[in-house]
Image (spheres, rainbow, N blue to C red):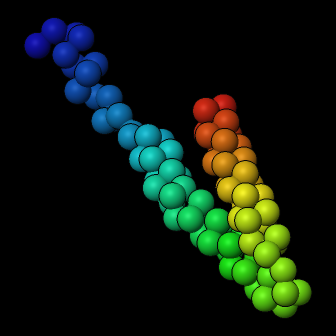
């Protein structure tokens, strides 16, 4: 064997832990978005029934959609900087 083959045999295998860690962070993104939007919708429905109105549900649900999108974008930026 030549010197290069010996050097390659002594190297530890590449660690793919970083790749999997980033992947695992984003597996829950859909669940996080869905729960945030559902919680906003539920809060809006509750406020509508409490105050006998029809304005809270659409506005709070839309606010929850924007909040969930902000959280996802912030996570993507954080992971891309790592």
Task: Work out whether residue 51 can be spotted.
Answer: yes
Quarter of the N terminus within the rendering: top left
Residue 70 versus residue 41 in the image, above or below: above
Give me the residue at 22% from left, 19% from top.
6
The front one of 48 and 42 is 48
Q: Position of residue 41 (x, y in %)?
A: 68, 73
Quarter of the C terminus within the rendering: top right
The front one of 30 and 66 is 66
Give me the residue at 44% from left, 40% from top.
19
Give me the residue at 64% from left, 65% from top.
37
The front one of 11 and 67 is 67
Based on the displayed image, in which of its 4 quarters is residue 59 positioned? bottom right
Residue 6 versus residue 42 in the image, above or below: above
Q: Position of residue 73 (x, y in %)?
A: 66, 42
Question: Could you tell whether 2 is left or right of 13 in the image?
Answer: left
Q: Position of residue 64 (x, y in %)?
A: 72, 61
Task: Work out whether residue 71 can be spotted.
Answer: no
Residue that lies at the very extreme toward the left in this rendered image = 1
The front one of 44 and 17 is 44
Based on the displayed image, in which of its 4 quarters is residue 54 positioned? bottom right
Give me the residue at 59% from left, 60% from top.
33
């Amino acid at each position: 064997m030549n010197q290069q083959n010996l050097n390659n045999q002594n190297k530890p295998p590449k660690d793919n832990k970083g790749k999997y860690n980033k992947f695992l962070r984003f597996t829950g993104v859909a669940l996080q978005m869905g729960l945030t939007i559902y919680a906003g919708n539920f809060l809006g429905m509750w406020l509508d029934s409490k105050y006998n109105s029809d304005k809270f549900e659409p506005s709070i649900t839309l606010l929850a959609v924007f909040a969930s999108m902000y959280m996802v974008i912030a996570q993507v930026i954080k992971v891309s900087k790592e």
